[in-house]
Amino acid sequence: MTGGDDGGGVAVVGGGVIGSIFAAHLARVTDVSVLCRREEHAAALERDGLRVTGKHDFAARLHAATSPAALAEPWLAIVATKATALAGAAASLRGHWPRSTVMTVQNGLGAEEVVRRHGAWALLSAVTFVSGTKHADTHVVYILDTETWIGPYESTPVEVAERAGGLFDRSGLKVEVMPDLRPAQWSKLIFNATVNGVAALTGLRHDFHFASEDEESDLGHLVHALIDEGKEIARAAGIELHDEPWEMNVLATRRGSAHYPSMLEDVDSRRPTEVELINGALVRKAREHGVEAPLHTALFRLVKAREASYT
Amino acid sequence: MRVCVVGCGAVGSLFAANLAQLDDVEVWAYDLYGAHVDAIQRDGLRLSGAGDVVGRVRATTAASELPRCDFGIVATKAMHTEAAVAATAEAFAEGAVASVQNGIGNEEAIATHVRRVIRGTTFPAGRLLEPGHVQWDVKGDTTLGPFEPQPAGADEIARLADACTRAGMPTQAVADARGPQWRKLIFNAATNPLGALTGLTHGRVCEREDLRALVTNLVNEGKAVAAAQAIRLDADPEELIDHAARKDVAYDHRASMLQDVEARRATEIDYLNGGIVRFGREHGVATPLNEAVWALVKGVEAAWTS
């Protein structure tokens, strides 16, 4: 039965920050394996397990390998790579684990479609606000213990999403299961496109500047205008947002410690960013639905140009 | 004729050293950079590059030492106009003061301290190599005209233009100096911040089709604000942008704002895109992209202290 309740553990594809935080937590309540890109990473995880510090403090035992063939078929495979590595990760699963349900957690839009091109798995959609930082292959710091939202994709029954959600919940991760994830995905898309794009260009972490609207040149005006433009695109796409992105922004800037947005992190280390899947996705949706999006278009072009300046 | 250059950085030095070549002009320079002032006092003010001259200029960091002058030429960065002119206003009690600065709003700031003001725009460029020594990178024209609310007389504008021209800085006195000023403003506001935000040279900004389109969108907002004030641009800023992008002109040029950002110096964004936004608001013209770029560069500046 597709995505069915026939036992089996969880496989996490990608041992980055999000993958590591998920894998370690889930390993407290089920069998977990991690599919890594590097041999030494897999070997270290097999040998030493995974240590979590920060919001939670524990060590987990799990399995790891660099090929799905080396791992038992899980009931749930969570693809937790960055959006830039998603296509490669999905390709590596082709022909494997036919009875598994595959869940994407990438930023932006369209991750499910990328996975779908490589197999007929039942799919779950997810967005996550969890963040942290990796100190080593076997040590991740859990910084923001925020929610992960899970919902069915296409014809996957909502019960499958609930089963995944139950597992997250028991493992100590904050989770919400939704019958339709698109409203939440779009809320995060608008939030992410705005905050990540502005952070990448200015060098600012997500701090009070993003919500400040006192002086006429204050950044909050631009952030607000970008969010309003994003909401217009969502409306044209027939999406009713789950969370109000401006409120998400204001709330996030009041958390105390300013989050280091991943796109800024990428730009700071001159790496390719997720701009195509985040800002690009939003701009393409605007075009698809005939909405003018001059500000997001400008932001997208500027970040792309910033990437081009590495060479 | 006695002229004082207020703010003797690269552009100020081009005016000061060249004007000092003339027998009938006595040149003073006011600047707060002590080592530069000392070097000028000791060895004269030296230009190399597009022209090689040494000018005998009397330089000082103390505004109280300035004598009464017929003309002032303000060449500070735009954010220092107010303080520099407030300090030196006494020297211009009988004189007329010209701005040759970047951006918009400098004449307004000068006019709060000085009665007769000249609106100016200049294209030559250079950079300070060491105290007392400026590299003259590009020659170019200067335009001077009245600042409409508090104008200098046409005759004195013509006198200053004539002196600059004779000194090797080709300068035109015109009845309406807003056209060239807005052309340069629009050029700078559409290109400088994009260089600063992306890290790309002028040529690379222009060869990316999508970014070049953004430049045009910014230019069009600026043109609309100029049109709302009945300003006739003396030429299309787009021509200047494409000309500068040529490999043999300024393809590899890193915009001054990019240089500022890399050195973590305050930029002139408030007087470029910020100026377009403010004048747009006054005249009921929406400038969302200039607002966006303004906020982003202000964000860059804020990140240095966050």
Image (cartoon, rainbow, N blue to C red):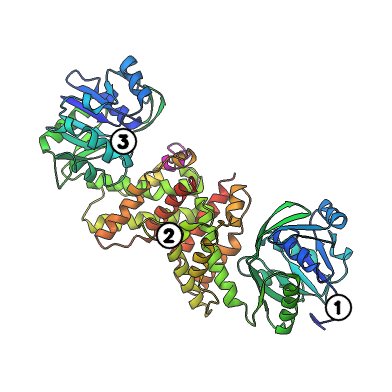
- At label 3, the amino acid type is Thr
Q: Are marks 2 and 3 on the same chain?
A: no
Question: What secondary structure prevails in the magenta region?
Answer: loop
Whether B201 is drawn above or below A125: the answer is above
Q: Are marks 3 and 1 on the same chain?
A: no
- At label 2, the amino acid type is Ser
State the separation of the CA atoms marked 3 and 1. Answer: 74 Å
Coordinates of residue B81 in the picture (x, y in percent) = 28, 39
Subunit ID for the residue under disc 1: A
Secondary structure state at the residue bearing disc 3: loop
Q: Which mark is residue A7?
A: 1
Within the magenta stretch, is there residue B253? yes
Quarter of the picture holding the N terminus of chain A:
bottom right
B255 to the left or right of A256: left
- At label 1, the amino acid type is Gly
Coordinates of residue A39 in the picture (x, y in percent) = 84, 53
Instruction: Indicate which label's residue lies in the foreground, 3 or 1.
Output: 1
Query: Which residues make up the magenta segment?
Result: B245-258
Subunit ID for the residue under disc 3: B
Q: Nearer the viewer, residue B193 or A254?
A: A254
Q: Which mark is residue A212?
A: 2
Q: Nearer the viewer, residue B33 or A233?
A: B33
Coordinates of residue B282 in the picture (x, y in percent) = 25, 59
Instruction: Indicate which label's residue lies in the foreground, 1 or 2.
Output: 2
B183 to the left or right of A197: left
The residue singled out by tag 3 in the image is B76
Report whether residue A164 is seen. yes
Q: Nearer the viewer, residue A252 or B211?
A: A252
